[in-house]
Image (cartoon, helix red, strand yellow):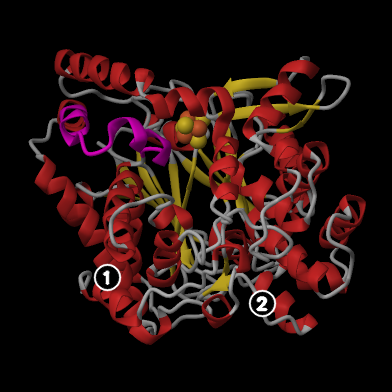
Amino acid sequence: MDKILRINMKTKDVLYEDVSEQYSKLGGRGLIAKILLNEVKPTCDPLGRYNKLIFATGFLTGSLVSSASRISIGAKSPLTGGIKESNAGGITAMRLAQNGVKAVIVEEIPEENNWYYIKISKNSCTLESADEYKGMGTFEFCNEMLKKYPNCAVTCIGSSGERLYGAAAIATMDKENNPNRYSGRGGLGAVMGSKYLKGIVVTDKGSVEISDKEEFSAALKQYSSVVKDAPSSLTYKSLGTASTSRVTNEMNGLPVNNFSGEKFQHLESISGEALYELIESRGGEGKTAHACMPGCIIQCSNVVPDENGKTIVSPLEYETIGLMGSNLGIGNLEIIAKLNAICNDIGIDTIETGAAIGVAMEAGIIEFGDGEGALRLMEEIKEGTVLGRVLGNGVEITGKVFGVRHIPVVNGQAMPAYDPRAIKGMGVTYATSPMGADHTYGAVIKTRKPYAQASRESQILLALYDTLGICMFARGAVGKNYELLVNLINAKNGWNIDSQWLMKIAEDTIRDEHKFNQLAGFTNKNYRMNESFEETEIADIQAVFDVSDEDLDKVLNSFK
Ligand code: SF4
């Protein structure tokens, strides 16, 4: 039977706990919300002893259902001051499930300044010294772990997390054992660093129990055929998420030169098609249609090679192209890939960092379009210079330090690559999310519905996917065909749930998250759009963010 692992970084106690009834039918983001609400003082210092860092698996993790083994990581966020969950692909979640671990809860901070990693094996868990790995990038640390434990899966931080940067992220190994999959948002890497935890290493492979193999096999066949043939899956497989840039640029929603509202003049150099051409023409280690975890049919990921066919980075995604490309006036995929590669090695969020560099460009630190200058700024972040520390602490601090008022931020967290004046449904999500500006909380790009309604519906749908541990890119294929998911979940776990139950846990998750923030001191007045985006018009389309406070309150009040 699955267990919850509880590790105290102060006492070094390691406990395997039975899963309580309250937690047994929760997973991923829903489980994290419930544990944080039950166990963490909402007013605590996010980098202090009372915060807890939680790693959670989903309902189908480890069963090789396509795109269904994401790892959810959560804590109180140092960026937003509220609850945060950020999930990623890769192999750690499936290894945890294969070793009978439903979730890992990391508590307290050490009294001494020593670094540790958590080693999880088939029947044991130990805290091991990581002092010799302090300062290592994520790739070097993973290589060291692979030398010691050849079959391991690793989730870890780089130097950004060790320095407690507000933009620090947590990396998870992909199926080729590279730490490329990111729980990027909310500064969770800093929470891990505050606990002197360099990594979690799962050393053994295994398999998970399937309650009804025959039913499961039939349900899996049905689910896989729907996912495989869906138009959205085919687009992701060929062009990756970069295909989004053409749509958003057409809407004036792709960020350009610090969210200026202009259209990007070099779109053809950074589009999904351009990225595909670059990868295919260079060959070598380059790859389109790459899967971040075993069993993923959608394969939205890629590997971007240099001129010699050697990997620069994997994956290069829309959000990074938007924030570290067009938002910086950079129309060169090779430079964007290099910026991304540095982020991955030092373990920092590309969205927050791209937004911070964009604000620094607006302040005149370097010019828009200066790719070499942006690479130099990344080196400053890596080296921990004063300027690097400012940028590494995110876009809001960068804006304050340099006196820039047009800061693409909501509730302390940088906006992803959708300008909320042009893509207003996403703006409603930014404003009403208890996690700051976050597209994964309720993605809405084009809609015929009222913006508030479209955002609310998307928030519920994505809470469901995050709680099940399924990739949001499966939603284009599965949509509201909840029976596909119900059949898989029941057959895998021996449960008897229905689609109404699924919707209830999704809404309950959002309620728990808002409750946590409310206890931390948030009121409806905290959930508002950044004023600069209500005042500064996109001239081309004469648009500001103008969804009313009443409409935002309707979304918020529906989750009380
Ligand atoms: S669709 Fe993309 S992000 Fe999602 S699991 Fe597959 S490769 Fe990973």
Q: Tell me if residue 58 is in the magenta stretch.
A: no
**On screen, 51 above or below 93?**
below
Where disc 1 sits, the SS reads helix
Is residue 127 found left or right of 550 in the rendered image?
Answer: right
Query: CA separation, marks 2 and 1?
Result: 26 Å
Q: How crowded is mark 1: few (under 14 residues within 10 Å), some or many (20 or more)?
A: many
Which picture quadrant has residue 415? Answer: bottom right
As rendered, which of 219 and 271 lies closer to the eye? 271
Residue 56 in the image: state x and y as whole percent. Answer: 39, 48
Q: Mark 2 points at which residue?
A: 406
Q: Sequence-wise, which precedes: disc 2 or disc 1?
A: 2
The answer to which of 550 and 321 lies nearer the viewer is 550
| Magenta region, main secondary structure | helix
Asked which secondary structure carries label 2, the reply is loop
Image coordinates of residue 502 in percent, x first then y, are: 17, 46
Residue on which disc 1 sits: 555
Task: State the image quarter where residue 78 is shown.
Answer: bottom right
Drawn side of residue 120 relative to residue 275, left or right:
left
Which amino acid does the dot numbered 1 rest on?
A: Val
Packing grade of label 2 (10 A; few <14, some 14-19, many >=20) is: some
Q: Residue 62's mark?
A: none
Q: Is residue 487 visible?
A: yes
The magenta region covers: 470-488
Q: Which residue is drawn at 86% across and 60% down?
A: 377
Of the 4 image quadrants, the one containing the C terminus is bottom left
Residue 479 included in the magenta stretch of the image: yes
Question: Which x, y percent locates residue 530?
Answer: 53, 78
Instruction: Say which amino acid is labelled 2.
Output: His
- Residue 169 or 230: which is nearer the viewer? 230
